[in-house]
Image: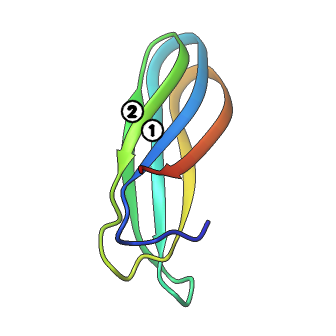
């Protein structure tokens, strides 16, 4: 996704975490420069335990070089994750 490095963003995602035994879910933003080379992998939110609902996290680009981003979800441990409606939108 192309972004404007001078803006702030809100990441929103719907999570349904079930059968939680241990571990958690971490949301990352991978940042890329104009040549689409990876600059950084930044965690922007974590959740553990059984959970159903919307999680929101503020995202601020790390530098003016960041022109593209991808949201990534990493699960660790023993749980079942259903994710939907993952969005990154500029804050007006």
> Percent position (x, y) of residue 92?
42, 51
Residue 23 against residue 20 in the figure, above or below: below
Pick whichever, 73 or 91, lies toward us.
91
Taking 35 as reference, is 22 left or right? left
How many dots with numbers?
2
Instruction: Write down the residue under mark 1.
Output: 26
Cα separation, mark 2 vs mark 1, equals: 4 Å
> Percent position (x, y) of residue 68?
54, 72
Q: Residue at x 44, y 33 (%)?
A: 56
Pick whichever, 38 or 65, lies toward us.
65
Mark 1 nearby-residue class (10 Å; few <14, some 14–19, many ≥20)? some
Residue 82 against residue 45 in the figure, above or below: above
> Percent position (x, y) of residue 43?
37, 49
Pick whichever, 58 or 46, lies toward us.
58
Taking 59 as reference, is 25 left or right? right
Q: How is the image coloured?
A: rainbow
Q: Can you name the residue that lies furthest to the front here?
A: 92
Q: Secondary structure at mark 1?
A: strand
Label 2 close to label 1 by CB (< 8 Å): yes
Q: Residue at x 46, y 69 (%)?
A: 31
Residue 5 against residue 82 in the figure, above or below: below
Taking 34 as reference, is 64 left or right? left
Q: Quadrant of residue 41?
A: bottom left
Mark 2 nearby-residue class (10 Å; few <14, some 14–19, many ≥20)? some
> Percent position (x, y) of residue 86?
62, 40
Residue 63 against residue 7 in the figure, above or below: below
Q: Which numbered marker is on residue 46?
A: 2
Indicate the quadrant containing the N terminus: top left, top right, bottom left or bottom right: bottom right
Q: Secondary structure at mark 2?
A: strand
Q: Which numbered disc, 2 or 1, marks the residue that appears first in the sequence?
A: 1
Q: Residue at x 47, y 27 (%)?
A: 55
Q: Which numbered marker is on residue 69?
A: none
């Amino acid at each position: 996704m192309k972004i404007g490095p001078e803006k702030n963003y809100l990441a929103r995602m719907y999570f349904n975490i079930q059968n939680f035994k241990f571990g958690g879910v971490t949301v990352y933003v991978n940042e890329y420069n104009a040549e689409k080379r990876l600059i950084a992998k930044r965690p922007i939110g974590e959740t553990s335990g059984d959970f159903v609902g919307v999680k929101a996290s503020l995202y601020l680009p790390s530098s003016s070089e960041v022109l593209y981003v991808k949201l990534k979800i990493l699960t660790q441990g023993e749980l079942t994750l259903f994710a939907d409606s993952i969005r990154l939108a500029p804050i007006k």
